[in-house]
Amino acid sequence: MKDNFDVAAYVAARQQMINEALAAELDKAAQAAPPGEGTERLLAAMRYSLLAGGKRLRPLLLLATVESIGEKREDELAGYLPFACGLEMLHTYSLIHDDLPAMDDDDLRRGRPSCHKAFDEATAILAGDALLTHCFFCLLSTPGSSAVQVLQAAQYFAWKAGLGGMVSGQALDLAAEGQPLELPELRKIHANKTGALLEAAVVCGGRLVGSSGPQQLALQGFGRQFGIAFQIADDILDVVGDESKLGKPVGSDAENDKVTYVSLLGMDGAKQAAVEAMAAAQNALLLLGEQGWLLAALADYFCQRDN
Ligand code: GRG
C-alpha cells in the first residue's frame, strides 16, 4: 500500500463523485422522458432507490481499476463515470426486484422501506426495469474510452449481469430453497448472484483502459476471490451485524432457513474461509505488480466493513 494512503477518505471522495453523477444522470433522463404523472411516479421510485445511499462498491471498483491499471488522473475520471453509474443502476435494479414479494419479500433496504413498500409492486417492477435498461444507455455513453473498448466492456457486463452470472445465480438460489445445500453449490450460487457483478466491475474497468490479457486474468481472479470474501462477510454480518448500520434486520438468513457460509461452516469456519478468499484475492493482484495496490486496499477495507 502507498504510504499514508487514507482509504476511508478515498472511498468517501469517490462515493461523493458517484452520487453526484447518479443524480445528474437521472435528472438528464427525466428531462428527456415523456412527461406525465406515470413517468413522474416511475422517476420518483428510481430516485428513491438509486439515491438512497449504499456503498457504491461496484462503481468504486471500476473507477479504482481505471485509475490504477489505466493510470488515469482524478480529473480524467469524468470520462468513465457514465459506465460507473450504469453498474450502480443495474445493482439497484437487482436489489429492488430481489425485495419483491415473489422473491425475497423484504420490507427494508438501505435503511428505508423497500421500493415496493414505499410505492407499490407495479411501480417497483417498472423502476427496476427502467434502471436495468438505463444502465446500458449509460454504459454505451462512456466518452473516456474508444468505441471498441466500450462495446467490449458493455458486452462482458451484459453477460455477467444476466445469464452468465447474476440472474442465473438468483435462479439457482430460488431453485435451491428448502434443499439441503453443500459448500460447492453454495459457492456456485454466490459466485454468480453476488460475485459476477463484482468481478465484472474490475474486468470492465480493465477493458475500458485497454488492459493486457494477463492483466485481465489477474483482475478476473481478484474479482472472483474478493466476491467470495465479500459474500462471506455479508453472511457473518447477518449474524453479528448492527441493524442500524446495516439498514436491514439481522438474523434474516436464519429466520428464512437460508443456507449460508456461517450455517455450513460455523462462525469460526466462515471467518477462516473469508481470510483464505482474501488471501487468494491479494495473491491474484501480485500479477499486477505495483498497479495492484489500490484494489488491494479497497478489498481489505470492504471486507472489514460493518454495513
Ligand atoms: C433479482 C435478478 C435479481 C437478482 C438479485 C444481488 C441479488 C440478486 C440479490 C441481493 C441479495 C443479497 C442481499 C445478496 C448478498 C450480497 C449483496 C449483493 C448485498 C448487497 O450489495 P451491497 O452490500 O449493497 O453492495 P449496497 O446497498 O451497499 O449497495
Image (tube, rainbow, N blue to C red):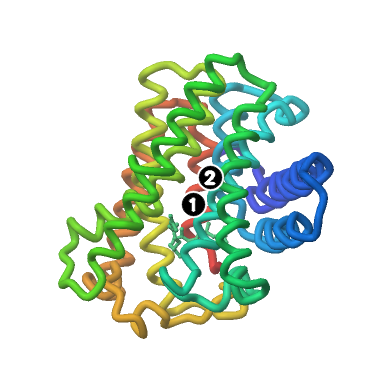
User: Pointer 1: what residue?
Assistant: 300
Residue 269: percent from left, percent from top: 25, 68
Q: Is residue 217 left or right of residue 106?
A: left
What residue occupies the far bottom of the structure in this picture?
Answer: 255
User: Pointer 2: what residue?
Assistant: 297
**Residue at horizontal 46 percent and vertical 64 percent from the top:** 98
Q: Is residue 117 left or right of residue 266?
A: right
**Residue at horizontal 77 percent and vertical 49 percent from the top:** 23
Q: Is residue 303 left or right of residue 192?
A: right
**Residue at horizontal 28 percent and vertical 67 percent from the top:** 261
Q: Is residue 64 above or below residue 168?
A: above
Q: Secondary structure at mark 1?
A: helix
Residue 17: percent from left, percent from top: 75, 44
Q: Nearer the viewer, residue 251 or 123?
A: 123
| Label tally | 2
**Residue at horizontal 62 percent and vertical 22 percent from the top:** 71
Q: Quadrant of the N terminus?
A: top right
Kindly tell me whether residue 245 is visible in this rendering: no
Amino acid under label 2? Ala
Q: Is residue 207 above or below residue 32?
A: above
Is the Cβ of the residue at disc 2 closer than 8 Å to that at disc 1?
yes
Q: Quadrant of the C terminus?
A: bottom right
Q: Is mark 2 within 8 Å of ligand 1?
A: no
Q: Is residue 150 above or below residue 100?
A: above
